[in-house]
Structure formats: structure tokens, C-alpha cells
Amino acid sequence: MAFVKKNPDELTCNPFETIGKDWFLLTAGTPEAFNSMTCSWGAMGVIWNDPSVTAYVRMNRHTFGFLEEGTTFTISVFPEEYRKALAYCGSHSGKDVDKAKETGLTPVELDGAATYAEAKLVFVCEKVYAQMMNEDCFVTTEQKTAYYGKDPMHKMYIGRIKAVYVQE
């Protein structure tokens, strides 16, 4: 199998399944120096007339620094058989371990961005907007209480989808 570039309009994936149930790896940095983290929050849609993804990263995550420094990131979705690898990437810090080595995932470069050969779907994104979430902006307290009791707030990143790749 090989990656084939597709137009975002050709995709038929369900974002609720792709993000919330399948999870994904958000990878930031360069192909030479990067980190990946597992995410199950995010959004896909259109903003400013561009197909886009929105991802949320806490400041205490190792990936945060890579995302702050760079302009490109990838969203990589995997087949179910890689669930254990995604669980590992979500529970171990890249500061402490080589996630690719520990999971057996194979880093590859697509359009100058890092991703993995085992992904079934990859969004190569250009960071176009970033903003810290503000606890004073919550309209209700339910989410604030449930998700930010001890943990720092997330920073929201909107990425313009520059390319989409699927395995064929």
C-alpha cells in the first residue's frame, strides 16, 4: 500500500467517528525532530473558506513546544489494529521515550511534515490560528469542572488542510 493524495472534498469519513472513536495522532515538529500525541478531541470543517481541523493541546504536553515552534502539523488516523500503539502514545511522554521505537510505528515524511507509514488517513495542516482557552469564557461550569480541575487549559489550534493522504 502507498499514500495517495486526495482532495478534501473527496473524503467521506464521519468526523465524530474519526476523532472521537478512532482517535488520531497529532504530530508536530520537523521530520528530523518531532513528537506525537494521541487525541480524541477536535473538529473538522470549513473556516475562512478553507477545509480545516481544530486541535486542542495542553501546555504541559511535550508536543506543545513543537506545535508552538512550527507552522505545520499532521493529523493521522490509524486502522483499529494500532489502537494499542495510540494508547501508548497517549500515556507516555516523548520526553521520556521514543514512541516510534516503543510502538513499532514507522515515521515518514509527507509534504515536509512527519507522520507514520501505518496511518490510513493523514491530514497535513498549516497552522493558521492559535489561542489559549480561557476559563472565564465557559458559559456553563460542567466542562470547566470536569476537564480543568487540576489540569492546565488547552490551547486551540486551527490548521488549514494543505493535503490529505489515504492508503490505497
Image (tube, rainbow, N blue to C red):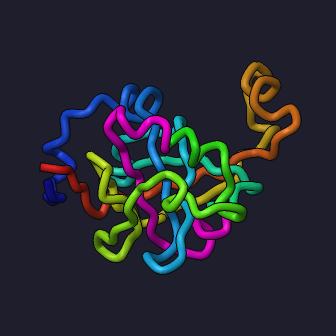
Left or right: residue 16 versus residue 129 is: left
Question: Between 147 and 110, which is closer to the camera in this rendering?
Answer: 110
Residue 146 is situated, as x and y percent measured from the top left of the image, at 77, 24
Please give the name of the residue rendered at 54% of the width and 45% of the height, measured from the top-left corner: 38
Q: Is residue 156 magenta?
A: no
Residue 8 location, x and y as percent? 21, 49
In the rendered structure, the answer to whether residue 103 lies left or right of residue 109 reads right
Residue in the image at 45% along x and 35% along y = 83
Closer to us: 158 or 168: 168
Magenta highlight on residue 84: yes
Residue at horizontal 70 percent and vertical 47 percent from the top:
154
Q: Quadrant of residue 88?
A: top right
Location of residue 151 (image quadrant): top right
Q: Position of residue 148 (x, y in %)?
A: 80, 34
Q: Position of residue 95 (x, y in %)?
A: 70, 64
Q: Is residue 168 above or below residue 83?
A: below
- Stretch in magenta: 64-85
Direction bottom: furthest residue: 32
In the displayed structure, would residue 47 be above or below residue 141?
A: below
Which residue is drawn at the image coordinates 14% and 54% (left, top)?
A: 1
43 relative position to 93: left or right: left
| Total marks placed | 0
